[in-house]
Image: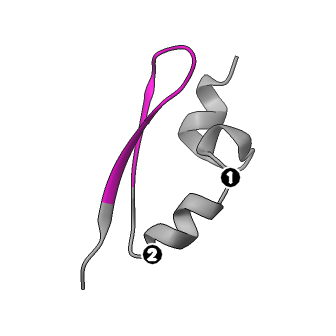
Amino acid sequence: MAFWVYILENPQGRFHIGHTDNIERRLSEPNPEEKTGTQYTHKISP
């Protein structure tokens, strides 16, 4: 099974690394900093 690994940088210069097996679906989803349920990005939000 193939998958994509991606790296996103937020306005504070911090990085979020993730992976998906469906890049089209992932691109249509909100960015991690917009999700309140994610552990890492929620913890470092301004």
Q: Position of residue 6 (x, y in %)?
A: 36, 50
Assign the magenta stretch its main secondary structure: strand
Element type where label 1 sits in the image: loop
Whole-Å distance between the Cαs marked 1 and 2? Answer: 14 Å
Q: Closer to the N terminus: mark 1 or mark 2?
A: 2
Q: Position of residue 39 (x, y in %)?
A: 59, 43
Is the Cβ of the residue at disc 1 closer than 8 Å to that at disc 2?
no
Image point (59%, 24%), residue name? 44
Quadrant assignment, res 29? bottom right
Image point (67%, 24%), residue name? 45
> What amino acid is labelled 2 in the image?
Asn
3 on left or right of 35: left
> What amino acid is labelled 1 in the image?
Pro
Does the stretch in magenta take in 19?
no
Q: Residue furthest left?
A: 1
Q: Position of residue 43 (x, y in %)?
A: 62, 29
Q: Which residues are magenta?
A: 5-18
